[in-house]
Amino acid sequence: MASILHIETATDVCSVAVAESGQLLAFKEEQFRHHNDHSKNLTLFIGECMRKAGKTLKDLNAVAVSRGPGSYSSLRVGTSVAKGICYAFDLPLIAVDTLQSLAFASQKAMPTPGALYVPMIDARRMEVYCRVFDENNSALTEAESLVLTEGVFASYFEEGKTMVFSGNGATKAQQVIAHPRAQFAPLPASAKHLVALAFHKFEDQAFENLALFAPFYLKPPNITTPRKRAL
């Protein structure tokens, strides 16, 4: 029996799940207005989930973390906590692609033969991080930063493809993509979406190098220099 702690902090949702051999035991998540709230709540959520699952950190066999893309600061919080637990209890680290986990959840929630699944993460303004997957959860494109416009996925629709958009960036897409074969799944990034993919990686012993692992930010953080005040 493999007990795995799952941590999802790629977006404004702070989410934790505990599962045993792919079966969800405990789950806690909350959406926050400010991403720095993740650092205040993540360890509390972990403690609550471990208690609900009737386990301690010593009972874990691995820790899984959502690797991004997503918010720079939020991903750092999730990764730091995950690595800290792994170091403290000599556990392997599993990294799950955030977009792939969203696509996987969308495929389960809205199974459509031949459809393409496009998970989207809000990257501010009309920009999203996205990737296209087929109905078998195989990636057809690389993750990219995309500015949403009305005809951005026109070539897929012209081929007769149904496209299922999910994630917190799909709300933006719904504002500009008006097509009868466009569908929208109201699914946010969530730790419970990591469970099945993380368990498969555990079985395959697909672990990360704990010392070298870093989140997949896709884009560098938007850091600005404050203006100097006039004397």
Image (tube, rainbow, N blue to C red):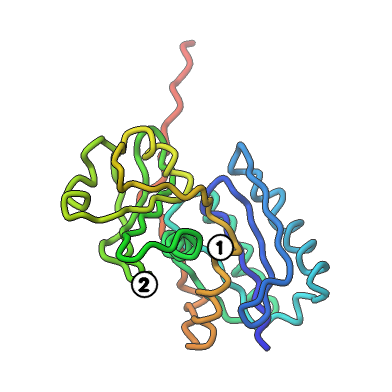
Query: Viewer-proximal residue, 228 or 231?
Result: 228
Residue at the spot of label 1 = 79
Q: Residue 90 appears at what percent x and percent y?
A: 65, 83
Relative placement, left or right, of 79 versus 119 is: right
Q: Residue 8 appears at what percent x and percent y?
A: 58, 59
Q: Residue 36 appears at what percent x and percent y?
A: 62, 43
Secondary structure of the residue carrying tag 1 is helix
Q: Is residue 156 visible?
A: yes
Q: Is residue 90 visible?
A: no
Secondary structure of the residue carrying tag 2 is loop
Relative placement, left or right, of 155 versus 41 is: left
Q: Amino acid at mark 1?
A: Thr
Give above or below for 125 relative to 220.
above
Relative placement, left or right, of 51 versus 208 is: right
Q: Amino acid at mark 2?
A: Asn
Relative placement, left or right, of 228 versus 138 is: right
Are the two marked residues, 1 and 2, in contact with CB atoms closer than 8 angstroms? no
Q: Residue 94 appears at what percent x and percent y?
A: 53, 75
> Residue at image x 22%, y 49%?
157
> Residue at image x 58%, y 81%?
92
Residue at the spot of label 2 = 136
Q: CA gap, disc 1 to disc 2?
A: 28 Å
Please rate how many residues cluster around mark 1, counting C-alpha atoms within 10 Å: few if below 14, some from 14 to 19, many from 20: many
Please rate how many residues cluster around mark 2, counting C-alpha atoms within 10 Å: few if below 14, some from 14 to 19, many from 20: some
Quarter of the figure with the N terminus? bottom right
